[in-house]
Structures are given as structure tokens and as C-alpha cells.
Image (cartoon, rainbow, N blue to C red):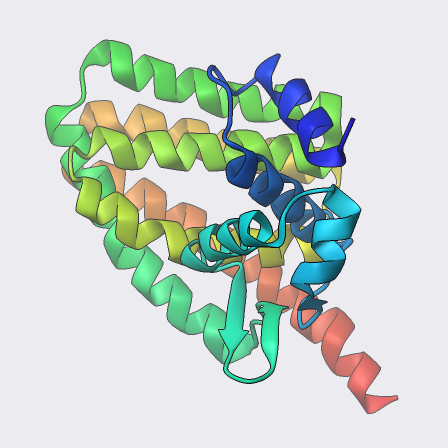
Amino acid sequence: MPAFRKAAAKRRDTAVPRRESVPAAIASVIREKIFRGELTPGARLIENALSKELRAGQPTVREALFTLEREGLVERVPNLGTFVRELDIKDISNLYRVRAELEGLAGELAAQRATREEIERLRDMAMEMKSGARGGGKWGFLQADLAFHRFLWKLSGNPQLAALLEPVVVPLLAFSYMQIDRTTEELFQSADVHISIADALVRGPREARAAIETNMRVFLDRYFSYVLNAVLPAKRH
């Protein structure tokens, strides 16, 4: 069985309620490779090689890469090919400023329109981040993390806002999980911050935005600590 079909079959038992199309399944396999660090930032994605590895037609692989490009995980460089997206310090800072505004707005709108049942579901999804960390480490946590944020955007009632957030948040999370080691305790702490976001929706729009901004600061503190402790010393040597 081709690798992408095995991956799709595995996901149908958990998070995927319907059968994925072949391009979507291939995109999922490549996405997972990126998040797991098997495909590192700057790596070239050769359609012919991926087609042979995944036993799928080249047009199908190309469609999957278009999906990943829309998510912000890969970028196409004219006359050179497709590459796993690279983010530097300035990119991270710029994207997080955009994310803070857009996701803060999503939180405000969700606080205004979400039902108690929907907010409780969001809280459950934050709890599932801990289960994901226990069962699948960073990868299990990441899947639950993305599901939480996508559901938050859905609760905003603004699909255009969700479409704008997707290519901002996905590459930020990809960078985080590829580059920064996290202990299980740190993952649990992050899940607790997400629980506080769900709880803040009940208290109102202002509180929801404040909780989301706290989540941003947690990541940025971790990121800049990583840069200072790992990247910069390495360059000095």
C-alpha cells in the first residue's frame, strides 16, 4: 500500500471523519514530514522524486504542493523549484504581529457569537492537546494544537478571517515544532494556556483577546530564548 494511503487510513481512525482525496492525502504525508523535521527548511521538493516515493502521478503531487503552498509551508521559486519555507527572525516577528491582530479579532468575534456548548468543545480540544502529547509527543500535540486554532477561527463566524490565518499560523507552528525542543511538561503548560483562551471566551471579547496575546508571548519568549541559546552561540563558533 502506498505511504500516503497508509497515512490516510490511519488518520480516518482518529481526526478525519471522511475519506481524503489522493492529493489531500499526499499533502498530509508531506506536511507531516515537514513538521517532524524529515524535510528541513530550504529543502527542495522534487515532484518526480515525490511521485516515485509516494507512487502517485506527478500532477497529483503538484496539486498537493499547491495545497501546502497555500498553507505557507512551501514556496515556489521561479526557474528553481519548490522548497520547504524558511523563516528568519524578522519573518517570525512579522508573522506574529499579523497573527496577534487577526487571531485576536477571531477571539473577540468568537466570544460574541459562540454558544456555551461550542466553547466547552473548544476547551475539550485544549485538553486533547495533553492527550496528544502523551500519545504522540510533539506530533500528537501539534495535530491537536492546529485543530484547536482552526475551531477557534470557525467560531468567529468569519471564513475570510480563517483563510487569512491559515498561511500565517501553520508555518509558524511548523517552525516551532521543527526547531524548538519541548519537554512534555512544556507541552502541558502550552495546553493550559489554550484552556485559558477557551475560558476567556465566556468572560467577553476583551478577555479573549488578552488570553490570545498571552499565548503569543509564551511562544515568542520561547523562540527568542532558542535563538539566543542555540543559534547565536553556534554562529560565534
Quick check: 138 above or below 117? Answer: below
Quick check: 191 above or below 179? Answer: above
Can you give x and y, in whole percent of width and height, for residue 199 in the image?
32, 24
Quick check: 128 above or below 227? Answer: above
Q: Residue at x 37, y 35 (%)?
A: 150
Query: Is residue 95 visible to the viewer in this orientation of the structure?
Result: yes
Q: Nearer the viewer, residue 233 or 103?
A: 103
Q: Nearer the viewer, residue 77 or 152?
A: 77
The residue sitting at the right extreme is 237
The image quadrant of residue 112 is top left
Q: Nearer the viewer, residue 140 or 199?
A: 140
The image quadrant of residue 39 is bottom right
Can you give x and y, in whole percent of width and height, for residue 189 in the image?
59, 35
Q: Nearer the viewer, residue 134 or 150?
A: 150
Can you give x and y, in whole percent of width and height, for residue 209 in the image?
25, 44
Count of picture labels: 0
Quarter of the figure with the C terminus: bottom right
Q: Residue at x 23, y 29 (%)?
A: 155
111 to the left or right of 130: left
230 to the left or right of 12: right
Query: Is residue 180 visible to the viewer in this orientation of the structure?
Result: no
114 to the left or right of 178: left
